[in-house]
Structures are given as C-alpha cells and as structure tokens.
Amino acid sequence: MLASHCRRFLSTAQCRQHLLSRLFTKSDVHTRNIHTSPSVWHGHITRPEPGTGVKVHFKDSKGALVKTVEANEGDDLLSIAHEHDIDLEGACEGSVACSTCHVILPPEYYDLLPEPEDDENDMLDMAFGLTDTSRLGCQVKLTRELDGITATLPSATRNMFVDGKKSSH
C-alpha cells in the first residue's frame, strides 16, 4: 500500500512528508510550555526587620560571642549560621547524616525543643564533645519561644564524610 500510495509523489521525501502530515494532525501535536520565574524567587530569603525576628547568639567553644543575628520562625540554626558565615560545618547539608552541625544549648532552651528523633540521636552519639544539651543545628527550628537562644559551637567536629570537607552554602 505504501508503494502504491507514494506513486503519485515525485520523490520519497515528498511521500514521507505527506504520510507524516496525515499521521499527525494539528490536534495530535503537543507543544511544551516552559515556565520561568525570576531567579530572585529561588532561594531568596527575606530577613525580618530589626527587632522583629528571633534573636540567636552564636558563641565559640570558649564562650566568646561570635555573632548575634535575627532570623525568621522556622529557620534552622545550621542555615542561619551558613547565611551569616558562622563556622558551623554541616557536611551533610542538613540531611541528618553527620554530626558536624552539633551545637550545645543552654538547658532552659534545650527543654523548649521537641525530643530529638532516633536518627538525630544516632548522629549525636558520634559528635565531638557531646553534652546533655547537645543538638544538631539542622534540627533546631526556631520558634518565638526560642528568642534569645545561645548556640555554643564545640571546639572540634568529627567529619565522617570526608575529613576537612566543608559544605558550600
């Protein structure tokens, strides 16, 4: 049938084009729409107006203040530290697969947090300088109750992923 159908065309290319036009009508052809959004919408963080956010104090292992910042409710300590160039490693980038974002919290703030999940406890068991009030910074989500929290950085970390690797933020 193909040969007899194509006899009325002068070339094989014309026949092929005619057959394709009959196989695919305009209603069969689907177009792809690509949606774009301004890059500013992706990863853009809106910081609270001064005096309206949750205040977080970061201290080094000797108790010296590193930096005080304000953040939004729902932010985690690891992300805040990375945003403000505070040396809190986070080698697994918050996937609860390491203990390099280990922080030590004051007991009164530690008690305000929900109990750590099993996977966080497993990682904390590997943390250097573990205390009774240790948490992973990636798991500490800020609430209004935590306003004024102090996160003390340990004197060292154990990076089981790659010794010396630091995450990029």
Image: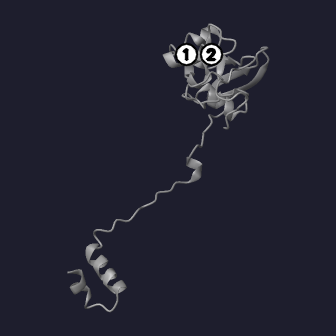
Q: Nearer the viewer, residue 62 or 125?
A: 125
User: Where 9 sits versus 153, above or below?
Assistant: below
Which residue is painted at 60% across and 13% down in the image?
A: 125
Q: Nearer the viewer, residue 132 or 65?
A: 132
Specify whether 65 is left or right of 83.
Answer: right
Of helix, strand and loop, which one carries label 2?
loop
Quadrant including the N terminus: bottom left
Q: Toward which corner of the image does residue 7 lie, by quadrant? A: bottom left
Quadrant including the C terminus: top right
Which residue is identified by label 1?
A: 122
CB atoms of marks 2 and 1 within 8 Å? yes
Q: Nearer the viewer, residue 159 or 88?
A: 159
Q: How many marks?
A: 2
Amino acid type shown at disc 2: Met
- Observer able to see residue 21: yes
Residue 36 percent coordinates (x, y): 50, 56
Which residue is painted at 31% across and 76% down in the image?
A: 20
Specify whether 34 is left or right of 104.
Answer: left
Q: Residues within 10 Å of mark 2 (few under 14, many from 20)?
A: some
Which residue is painted at 34% across and 85% down in the image?
A: 12
Q: Toward which corner of the image does residue 152 lie, by quadrant? A: top right
